[in-house]
Image: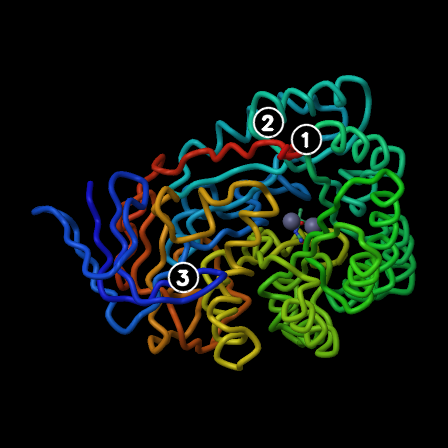
Amino acid sequence: MTTLIRGGTVVNADRAFRADVLCEGDKIVAVGENLSAPAGAVIVDAGGQYVMPGGIDTHTHMQLPFMGTVTMDDFFTGTAAGLAGGTTTIMDFVIPNPKQPLMEAYHTWREWARKAAADYTFHVAVTWWDDSVYKDMGTLVNEYGVNSFKHFMAYKNAIMADDEVLVNSFRRALELGAIPTVHAENGELVFQLQKELMAKGITGPRAHPLSRPPQVEAEAANRAITIANVIGVPVYIVHVSCAEALDAIARARANGQRVYGEALAGHLVIDDSVYECADLEFARAHVMSPPFRSRRHQNALWHGLQGGNLHTTATDHCSFCAAQKAAGANDFTKIPNGCGGVEERMAVIWDAGVNTGRLTPSEFVRVTSTNAAQIFNIYPRKGVIAVGADADIVVWDPNGSKTLSAKTQHSKGDFNVFEGRTVRGIPSVTVAAGTVVYDKGDLRAVAGAGRHVDRPAFKPVSA
Ligand code: URQ
Ligand code: ZN
Ligand code: ZN
């Protein structure tokens, strides 16, 4: 199939310029002015619009079994929702149960993902340690295109990685040329604070942020960064939500350490007042970890993105419906943690980032796509509009607007954390692997069209 995107302004992380984009099969084959296409080609009119690399969401959980239930979106509905929002690649997580062989979990997730409508790739969580984990990490890197391993420093008595696991796994990642990533929260502190709050009778969702104050995140971020420093491996901190964790990243980077940080669209625009709402169903719907924070932290996160200490934006898309969240009606520690956003990330960040002058369009591309592709070693296959890159493209209408709502979302579930927010700047057309999959409200996602994206290990390049 040939697709020509005509008359738009191409925006890459380094520059913006007027050009048409010609796609042949699943690749971009020409970028330039006045391109022509053979008869029968699909023509997309991008006049007055931006033509940008499809979004990469570095952090999603489709079909995740978690806290006694399974997330609403599977790999089809979740990736389809992403395509409607301009996201053409998701990075999801294989999360083995403690003692479960990594390879067994990996194959399970790969099977679940076969129905994905958009490209996908996996971080693999290291939730326990023994020689088989050491070996399987090698197999994953050398044979399955995995170059990042995730460590949950929270969720004690479930998937939490203690320091022994962190140190062993970080060392192994260094040997393999892979990057460790961490969910930075001190799981022991969370556990103890949860017990104290419950004992005091503070059982509702407003206890959730009280059990996970910023210091809990800062301690873990500092610890992970320190361990990475001693071992000499880069580290990537997922869903940085507070100024103190960001400070840890900034400090380490200023000292020459290679540390990357991820911000979530939700953390950038939603504040912790949601937990005070008298409507407990609404408050429970916002329970995720780390929790939403005060405006002070939101401002810090924007400064982190602007100043280059935060690099990627994601969603942690992990949606549960009200009935699932009600499992924690009498005990906030049992509310399944997680919120949605894969469909809204790009528009929310454009509206709150570009429309406010915080980000230029090129900076927007950098934090929604290019940096992710570079950090996780799939650039320039992804993250850029250039000859030879995958034809994953979003045509962005800077004047289009939309009011975000659970009633109109493609994502499954009965809640939208961005409910009622009107955004200006929305995708008009999404092209994935050279095919128009979303066209002004018409979603044409196809189950199974998404492909697994291999990510090679990081190797020194010799001169
Ligand atoms: O911690 C996470 O990233 C997942 C497993 C759960 N969702 C959440 O609350 N962030
Ligand atoms: Zn997490
Ligand atoms: Zn997550």
Q: Which residue is mark 1?
A: 96
The spot of residue 1 in percent (x, y) is: 20, 40
The earlier-in-sequence mark between 2 and 1 is 1
State left or right for residue 37 relative to residue 359.
left
The spot of residue 305 in percent (x, y) is: 64, 67
The earlier-in-sequence mark between 1 and 3 is 1
Query: SS of the residue at dot 2?
Result: helix
Q: Mark 1: which amino acid?
A: Pro
Q: Which residue is mark 3?
A: 409
Q: Mark 3: which amino acid?
A: Gln
At a point 34% along the width and 62% down the height, the residue shown is 51
Query: Badges 2 and 1: C-beta atoms under 8 Å apart?
Result: yes
State left or right for residue 365 relative to residue 95.
left
From the viewer's perspective, is residue 124 above or below residue 373?
above
Q: Which residue is mark 2?
A: 106
Please indicate, yes or no, whether residue 32 appears anywhere in the rendered image. yes
Instruction: Tell me which corner region of the image, top left, top right, bottom left or bottom right, holds residue 430.
Output: bottom left
